[in-house]
Image (spheres, grey):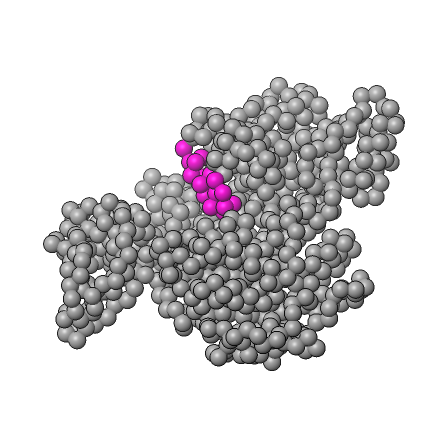
Amino acid sequence: MDKWFPQLKQTKCGADARLRLVTFPNSGSAENVYTGADKTAFGGASGRRDNELMVWAKKTKVEVYAAQPPGRDTRMREECLPSAAAIASAAFDVCEKDLFKGGVPWAIFAHSMGTWVAYEFCLLARAKGHPAPTVLVASGFPSPTCPMDKRPWAVSKGMSDDEFKDEARGWSINEVVFSEGMWKMYKTLLMVDFSCFDAYPEWTGKNAPLDCPVRTFYGSDDKRATKELVSAWSEVTSDCSVNAPIKGHHLFVYDEPARATWFKAVIGDIESFQPMAPLKSYLCTAKKGAAVRAGCELSTAQVQPEIDNGWLVDVSEEQENSKGTVRLHIVAYTKADGAKTACDCWGSKKLFEFKGTVEAAPAAAPPAPAAAAAEPPKAPAPETPAATAPAADAVTAFAGTTATMHTVTGKNGAMMRAGCELDTPELGVTLEQGTECYVVEEAKNAKGSLRSRIVCYTANGSPYAAIDGWCTAKFLTVVDKTKVPIPEAGSKPFAAVFARPTDSGNVMLFPGQGAQKVGMLAPYADTPGVKAMFKEASKIFGCDLLELVEKGPVEKLNDTRFSQVCVFLTSMAAVKKLQREDPKAVNKCAATAGFSLGEYSALTFAGVMELDTALTLLKIRGDAMGAACDLAPSGMMTVVGLDDDALKKMMPEGVSIANQLFPKGRVLSGSKEGLAKVEAEVKAAGIAGSKTIVQPVSGAFHSPYMSTAADKLKEALSTARLAAPARVVYSNVTAKPHDKDVESIKAKMCEQLMAGVLWEDTINDMAKRFPDVDNFYEPAPGRQLTSMMRRIEPKNQPKMKNV
């Protein structure tokens, strides 16, 4: 099940499911067309945000069976299935038992070639005696009744290379796929996928019409799947209609605004046949419990059980009966012990207290004891003071401008006035000690007191609030003299994992991939916050990462898709432990660097990325690197004992230096044939002390072989929220500190996937820039960087401390 429907766990709700939705992707794509995060919100206030379809599914208890056919994404190494019918049959065999369990209604939704797979899936369901779907949503593809001579493509079998490129371009495939180097990797994949609809048999009319309605979509600029062709789905059902076009070409599914519009329309189609308003949660507050009846009217029979005081109920609708009494339609109840039971009954609204939507108040959690229901509600937590009238003007006046960031350090806070002078009106707002605020100007008033003008602030992690007021400057302490953009009112503050340094003298050096081993977390697992951090990461990666690092299996831990995040999390855990045991040591770390993957740890430590952003980027990076490894046979090899000039003379085209380790120590990346040639030449040269070690990795990291991975990372980074570094943090690409421009940092992060890691140069630059370092800390796992320091800067090796 996990292979075919890897993200089902996101929406799995078992007996509570109100609908099950099956989806199939377009040619060459994967299930994340339907389950992937909303990229426009990536790195925003919440770090990662579900797309419109997933938000709706989680809110309304819809299980999404997003199919992942073999040969794509995480199943890249598996052999592709040769036809739409074969894909449908394989998926059906895997999910049949769960999909039709309990008589829960289902729907099906697909794009492009996936629509024909969906059609075959519907036929299989009917043949096996299962209910028809509530609706089939067929997007961007002709009806399966389309005659061979009317199909809007040419059969790819037997095409020349140029002919097939032209055919692929006709489907609006990204032009980067046709670039030199990329086409060699993608051509075979595309030909296999295209053969699925090339080989689809011509319609014979032998199949009876589907027993479900069909709703269709098409792209406004789609030259292949036109309105006329998608309208022909009416030939396979008695109830078919065409929706308004989605703005874009055939692959509008990769354009985030278009995808959001599409999902909203699809949800509307599904709900027109299966209403899915979010369930509401109510708490029974009646001291003697609430009697419930079979219907909304009081004349209907009373049913069991009576809802006791303190029980939670799930409500699907409210309705007035003939007496004018508002009644609740209860579809499930949860007892005080947490046991949940489905039901179908009605109760009087006045006997219940609204607690929110079901997803905000999960029924699985035991409700408060009955006695607590009678207690008066607690006063709400104090909110950030509302901005007075001048704040709205401040938003307009300072939108898009910059300010310096300060912290309120006055013992009694900082009282705000409308102007610089002390006789101007008070705003009724006092910023408490610890509040972060943004100052646009400072001026002395008539009494010679220096005053600061604040236009934005946040307290205790609350959303930024706009204001326009003045306070005494001595009650503020500047955090960073560099001017930064003023945050948008209502946005969430950047939640750095570690606080800014308060001193200098130490450096933190983070290890890279390859340092992982089962059990590496043991010294840090009980540090507060570590298990919660692993739990959060496990949601993003879809597996129990804590169990993986503690118990293995080692093969999975060594898979680049998981090893990267496990090394990153272990390093973060080690620093958290050091911070707890010796906070001064961490506070003095004013500079940091990381080897390869370790640069992500360093950027997070430097406050450039929030934890959610770092984890999501590592998921994308790891998956993309794994997929790139599958495209062409390649690898890595360490060469020791040769200087760069001698080594480069032995390197054929397609082999490059991926990592500087230490003087006369390099790691090469390239084709396996090219690496074998270098290995043979090193051996033939017979240079004393020289040797080669083929690395047990699946691909050529930090080389042009990772170009496809860099493209995916660039797409994710385009909307990721990064912040200027709070510490000096080094770039692997330049061996110099990153500057404060986040767009420059993003560019270097993409470049790092295809360029060599200049570690030797980094350590040398650090030695010149920071000659008086007290300690270099190397967080777990491993001690490779300590060993490399001995060969690069021997005088600093005694200063290395393992965490």
Residue visible at 28% across and 60% down in the picture: 331
Q: Quadrant of residue 795?
A: top right
Residue visible at 61% across and 25% down in the picture: 783
* Magenta-highlighted residues: 528-544
> Magenta region, mostly helix, strand or loop?
helix
Q: Is residue 294 magenta?
A: no
In the image, is residue 481 above or below residue 82?
above
Q: Nearer the viewer, residue 586 or 272?
A: 272
Where is residue 457 shown, x and y percent of the image? 41, 51
Q: Is residue 584 left or right of residue 117?
A: left
Q: Is residue 610 left or right of residue 195?
A: left
Q: Nearer the viewer, residue 337 or 20?
A: 20
Where is residue 791 shown, x and y percent of the image? 71, 23
Where is residue 706 shown, x and y percent of the image? 70, 47
Q: Quadrant of residue 686?
A: top right
Residue visible at 42% across and 53% down in the picture: 12
